Image (spheres, rainbow, N blue to C red):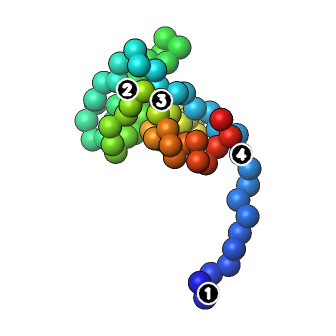
Amino acid sequence: MEGFTEYESRPIMRKAYQVKAHDEIRALGDASFAINIAKKDVTFKAHETVFPGDFIIHNGEDDVYHCRQTIFHDRNIV
C-alpha cells in the first residue's frame, strides 16, 4: 500500500501458560479473570471465552492476557 513501509519484526521469547482442562478460571469483572498457576493466583485480561488449550501470555505484571490456541500457534514456535 502506498505510503507504508515494511519493517521486519524482532524475534522474541514469550512467557505463556497453556490452560488445562482442570484449571478453574474466575471472573473478576471488567474483562479481568484469575487462574491459579503454580499455586499462585494470576490475574489476566480476556475479551472472549477461555478454553482448555488456549494460552495466558505474561509480558509483565501489568500485561497478562488471553490468546486463543490457534492464534498462539500461528505466531509462535510451539
Residue 37 in picture, x, y percent from top left: 49, 18
Dot 4 falls on a residue whose secondary structure is: loop
How far across and down, in percent of the image, does residue 35 sit? Answer: 41, 23
Q: Which residue does the image show at 34% across and 45% down from the upper left?
A: 47
Q: What residue do we see at 40% from left, 14% from top?
A: 22
Foreground tag (3 vs 1): 3
Q: In this view, which residue lies farthest toward the left?
A: 29
What residue is pinned by disc 2? Answer: 34
Q: CA distance from mark 4 to mark 3?
A: 22 Å
Question: Farthest residue toward the bottom?
Answer: 2
Name the amino acid type tagged 3: Gly
User: Around disc 4, counting alpha carbons within 10 Å, would you say few (fewer than 14), some (14 to 19), or many (20 or more)?
Assistant: few
Report which residue position mark 1 lands on: 3
Mark 2 lies on a secondary structure that is strand
SS at circle 3: loop
Camera-near label (1 vs 2) is: 1
Q: Earlier in the sequence, mark 4 or mark 3?
A: 4
- The label on residue 12 is 4
